[in-house]
Amino acid sequence: MASITIRNLDAHTKARLRVRAAHRQRSMEQEARNILRTALAENDVVPRDLGAAVGARFRPLGGIDLALPARGPMREPPLTGKTASK
């Protein structure tokens, strides 16, 4: 198995990793491996639009069915400018 060394890790990040590992009853090294494994297992496909990005973000939480009201005919636009003076 390969090894890596992470240099210049700030004290705050190291402390957060230590606390996170302790909460999960793991060593810091084990927790770092788990974080990397999880991050790299995620789907790397970038959504093409905002709607797809939002849907992908909330899909794991489950969906909700909404009753949408029936739509009526479109209203006439208001008269403005030159069309109002005719």
Image: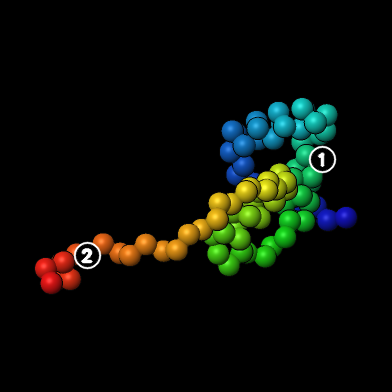
User: In the structure shown, which secondary structural element does the residue marked by tag 2 occupy?
Assistant: loop
Which of the numbered marks, if any, corresponds to residue 30? 1
Instruction: Give the residue displayed 55% in from the left and 51% down from the top.
Output: 69
Quadrant in the rendering for residue 32: top right
Q: How is the image coloured?
A: rainbow
Amino acid on which the number 2 mark rests in the picture? Leu
Residue position for label 2: 79
Regarding residue 68, the answer to whether it shows in the image is yes
State how many labels appear. 2
Q: Are marks 1 and 2 in contact (CB under 8 Å)?
A: no
Amino acid on which the number 1 mark rests in the picture? Gln
The answer to which of marks 1 and 2 sits earlier in the sequence is: 1
Residue closer to the observer: 16 or 46:
46
- Is 73 placed above or below 13 here? below
Regarding residue 6, the answer to whether it shows in the image is no
Quadrant in the rendering for residue 45: bottom right
* In-image side of 24 versus 67 (left or right): right
Instruction: Give the residue displayed 72% in from the left and 46% down from the top.
Output: 62
Instruction: Give the residue displayed 68% in from the left and 46% down from the top.
Output: 64
What x and y, as percent, mark residue 79? 22, 64
User: In the structure shown, which secondary structural element does the residue marked by tag 1 occupy?
Assistant: helix
What x and y, as percent, mark residue 78? 26, 62
Residue closer to the observer: 85 or 42:
85
- Residue located farthest toward the right when viewing the structure as drawn: 1
- Is 59 placed above or below 20 here? below
What x and y, as percent, mark residue 53? 60, 58
Q: Quadrant of the N terminus?
A: bottom right
Instruction: Give the residue displayed 69% in from the left and 62% down from the top.
Output: 44
- Is 17 placed above or below 47 here? above
Give the alpha-carbon distance from disc 1 to disc 2, as whole Å.
68 Å
